Image (cartoon, rainbow, N blue to C red):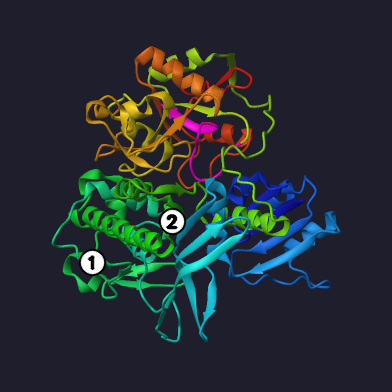
Amino acid sequence: MNILAINPGHNASAALVKNGELVYFIEEERLSRHKYDGNPFAAMLEAMEERIDVLLLGGTSIEFPSLPWTGEDPYSALVRKKYPKVQVYNLGHEHHLGHAASAFYNSGFETAAAIVVDGAGSNHEVNYSEGYETESIYLCGYPSEFKPVLKKYAGNKDGANIKTENLELNDAVTITKAYEAVTYYLGFGFIEAGKTMGLSPYGKESKDIPQMLYGTRADKNVFAPMYPAGAFLIDTMYENLANPQNPNEWHEDESKLTDTAKNLAWRVQHDTQNAVASLVQEAIERTGQKNIVFSGGYGMNCVTNYFLTKKFPEINFWFDPICTDAGTPIGLAKKHWHKETQDTKVRPLKSLYLGKSRPISKDHGMHSTLASPENVAKLICENNIVTIYQGGSEVGPRALGNRSILFDPRVPDGKEIVNVVKKREWFRPFAATILHEHFEEWFETAGIEESPFMMYAMKIKDEYIDKVPAVSHVDGTCRVQTVKREQNPAYYDLIKEFYNLTGIPMLLNTSFNLAGEPLVETFDDAVKTIKNSKIKYLYLPESGQLLQDQKKT
């Protein structure tokens, strides 16, 4: 049975589960080249190169439009016209369930408590009122058991305030809404919370910035949430928040960064990670579980993920690497499979290289030479930015060595160099990929055995911070990916050669794209990015080629 599930909203995506295995996943933006693109028609067409038996529509509160003549929604019609016998299931408003199922089935645990922390999930009717899912705890087990232990809703229009043992509905300001509000105040888009997270270590606790959250709810004197999307600071409540400086000034010029901006970022990171910790404690107490899986948009906060791992050393955590809305079809498709077949086989997520391998054109207009991993490592040692393109793309928001920009982590101003090339703000840090066998030597791992999906910002050991300034953030942390040779042979071999030359077992690794663009998907995307930037080199391990843009010196 081949099950195609889609998320039509922002972060539009399609997931194909074949006999219980996730065999294909892609976000629409990778194909359409429009960031956060909705309506995954291009993704569906690619997935439909395989036979489709079941189409799942769900995980969203959007009402699907009806087409003339047939009355079908456009997604059902598209699949039916190629596979007339396809079964279509509209799963309705089950957004958090999709998040929880993705995290649980990907984790490899046989039972777990799933925590979902989101800006706004599906809009549900609750005791004759309505509200958007904000935080959820589920008790999960095979084949398809997802028992809601705690459901929190907000954004209700009628002012209802309902609280029972396992349900809350009110007009509270939630964890993610607080983060959205600060992010917007700092001059970013509501869903660009990663930038606020990157700024937070520059700040510190200040009496001028009020405490923002109490338990899992934010101060309504400071925040005005909007549902389903957005939130604002009520800056008139505090003199130092009123009439903010134009953020474009300090986005571009470090000397103009204000104490208010950086301390505000610190405060929201500090308060929200403590709020999430209280949810973890509640999940433990309500379920008795020592296996905790985490999803929802807040799950991309790799600082909090590391914080939680250290705070709860007795807990086995799984932070789902596709925890944005894009990942919900994975959970819905897997849940459908296990429910229909009563299959209890555990299939942990082992790889994110789930994109299609795509052809490499010879008509690229660049100079081509044969290159070995040693040659490319030498180029990187000479302060050259080198991109790597190979195999199927890694899915999710993190580059993991198939669509990556690479640089020497030893370069003192390396962060500034690469940020300028990528057209990113000056304060944003870069990740590193380290050979797995050197992971515990270089990082304070807090008992984490590996980090193949780059879901933690970890402390670099003090004796090594100055050796890799390009990937060491202002607080000495680094978002880290570990790699074993069996996980990505060509990428591993390149880092190994760099280690042989320098004694440093890691490379700076950032996503192969420019600011505001999706990760490159096709070879043409890669070439276009090279030609529209100051990057000169493109390494193609599968053919042993190194392409060079000779127009750049």
The structure residue drawn at horizontal position 29% and vertical position 49%, both measured from the top left corner, is 311
Image quarter in which the C terminus is found: top left
In this figure, which residue is indicated by the disc labeled 1? 243
The structure residue drawn at horizontal position 67% and vertical position 28%, both measured from the top left corner, is 360
- Residue that extends furthest to the front in the rendered view of this protein: 288
In this figure, which residue is indicated by the disc labeled 2? 289
The structure residue drawn at horizontal position 46% and vertical position 60%, both measured from the top left corner, is 116
Q: Where are the magenta residues, as a range?
A: 393-407
Identify the amino acid type marked 1.
Asn
Q: Determine the secondary structure under disc 2.
A: loop
- Residue that extends furthest to the left in the rendered view of this protein: 207
Q: Is residue 342 left or right of residue 189?
A: right
Q: Is residue 534 visible?
A: no
Identify the amino acid type marked 2.
Gln
Q: Is residue 48 left or right of residue 367?
A: right
Mark 1 Cα-neighbour bin, 10 Å: few <14, some 14–19, many ≥20? few
Q: Magenta stretch containing residue 19, yes or no?
A: no
The answer to whether 284 is drawn above or below residue 128 in the figure is above
The answer to whether 527 is drawn above or below residue 20 in the figure is above
Q: Nearer the viewer, residue 205 or 236?
A: 205
